[in-house]
């Protein structure tokens, strides 16, 4: 896509915008999650290092131009109080209140997190919520005997017959967003830098900290000479962008079948600043996500040469990030549609 041609088209399109409705259509076309600017951003990881820097600057300049044009148009459509008083409207007539909605807090947090990683060169990719057992488990080095593959831990669906063959493949509601990692690495060659937002499902009993449906964001990077220190740097930038520059971060050894080595990531408690309180269980730390270096067996499943490439992956629950950031103590509040709660965000 020619970025100069896009810029010229923007100049033409903005001249045709003559109402708030037309302005919103213009904004979504260019600045929406699936808009033209997002398409340009998705090209960046595939460019060479030299091209990436130049093209990235051009994309940022184009984004600033779009934001400025939208803001100017909004101001031009605004009506001053003096002018409003001079209108011929009958001010004695009863008004019709039209309450404007806004994005759900989970959508806001998801967009915020994706924007942070987009600025670091990651591309946003989404995947299906109905997955195959291979993508959800086998391709991620999760063995047959692993408890998560049991029916009490996963929502299994009907079997899928491929063509006229006897072979069947189990379908399920994905239990994490990691299957997209398998899909992307099978379809595209490294280098890769991807973030995957979406809903996931597990048959958990609903309580203050669990839900049968919740949201996750998976992220992974694959390339030559990718190290654990790269993972730490990326996550440190993310944590400070979400929770503030003053927070501290630590990595604790852990086990995940699809990463080795693996680590849980904690941040210093945002309530007590690491001193210890009821929110952090007097420990001074709050767990925010899991991470690690992609296991060689995962690379083998998708046909990536482990002698040439390495990579890291991380995953986080969107609800958990939102609950920590806003001090929410019950996950059910996100799904009860109580406007008194939702209006706060």
Image (cartoon, rainbow, N blue to C red):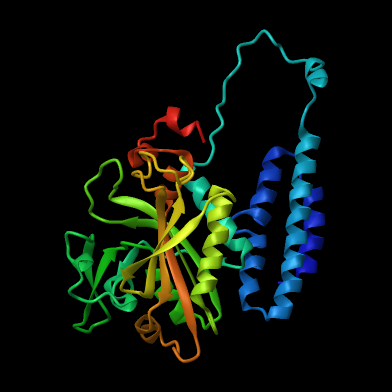
Q: Position of residue 188 (x, y in %)?
A: 51, 80
Number of marks present in the image shown: 0
Q: Residue at x 51, y 67 (%)?
A: 232
Q: Is residue 180 above or below residue 245?
A: below
Residue 114, quarter of the rendered image: bottom right
Q: Residue at x 33, y 39 (%)?
A: 332
Q: Residue furthest front?
A: 275
Q: Nearer the viewer, residue 338 or 317?
A: 317
Residue 216 visible in the displayed image: no
Q: Nearer the viewer, residue 135 or 304?
A: 304
Q: Residue at x 78, y 48 (%)?
A: 68
Left or right side of 284 for 133: left
Left or right side of 105 for 211: left
Q: Nearer the viewer, residue 105 or 286?
A: 286
Q: Nearer the viewer, residue 171 or 262?
A: 262
Left or right side of 238 for 119: right
Q: Position of residue 219 (x, y in %)?
A: 47, 66
Q: Residue at x 54, y 76 (%)?
A: 192
Q: Residue furthest top?
A: 92
Residue 161 visible in the displayed image: yes
Q: Position of residue 284 (x, y in %)?
A: 41, 47
Q: Position of residue 220 (x, y in %)?
A: 48, 70
Q: Is residue 333 above or below residue 303?
A: above
Left or right side of 235 for 151: left
**Which quarter of the rendering shows the N terminus?**
bottom right
Residue 153, quarter of the rendered image: bottom left
């Amino acid at each position: 896509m020619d970025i100069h041609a896009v810029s010229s088209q923007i100049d033409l399109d903005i001249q045709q915008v003559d109402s708030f409705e037309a302005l919103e259509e213009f904004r979504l076309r260019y600045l929406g999650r699936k808009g033209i600017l997002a398409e340009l951003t998705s090209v960046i990881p595939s460019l060479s290092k030299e091209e990436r820097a130049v093209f990235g600057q051009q994309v940022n300049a184009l984004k600033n131009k779009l934001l400025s044009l939208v803001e100017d148009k909004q101001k031009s459509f605004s009506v001053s109080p003096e002018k409003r008083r001079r209108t011929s409207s009958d001010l004695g007539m009863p008004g019709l209140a039209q309450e404007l909605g806004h994005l759900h807090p989970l959508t806001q947090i998801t967009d915020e997190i994706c924007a942070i990683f987009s600025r670091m060169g990651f591309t946003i990719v989404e995947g299906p919520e109905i997955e195959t057992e291979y993508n959800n488990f086998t391709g991620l080095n999760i063995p047959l005997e692993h408890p998560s593959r049991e029916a009490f831990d996963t929502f299994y669906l009907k079997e899928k017959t491929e063509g006229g063959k006897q072979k069947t493949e189990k379908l399920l509601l994905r239990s994490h967003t990691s299957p997209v990692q398998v899909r992307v690495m099978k379809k595209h060659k490294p280098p890769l830098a991807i973030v995957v937002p979406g809903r996931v499902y597990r048959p958990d009993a609903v309580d203050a900290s669990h839900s049968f449906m919740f949201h996750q964001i998976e992220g992974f990077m694959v390339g030559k000479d990718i190290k654990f220190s790269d993972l730490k740097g990326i996550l440190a930038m993310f944590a400070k962008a979400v929770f503030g520059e003053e927070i501290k971060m630590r990595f604790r050894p852990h086990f995940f079948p699809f990463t080795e080595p693996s680590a849980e990531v904690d941040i210093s408690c945002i309530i007590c600043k690491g001193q210890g309180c009821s929110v952090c269980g007097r420990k001074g730390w709050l767990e925010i996500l899991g991470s690690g270096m992609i296991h060689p067996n995962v690379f083998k499943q998708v046909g990536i040469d482990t002698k040439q490439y390495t990579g890291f992956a991380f995953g986080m629950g969107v609800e958990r990030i939102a609950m920590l950031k806003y001090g929410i103590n019950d996950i059910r509040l996100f799904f009860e549609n109580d406007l008194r709660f939702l209006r706060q965000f």
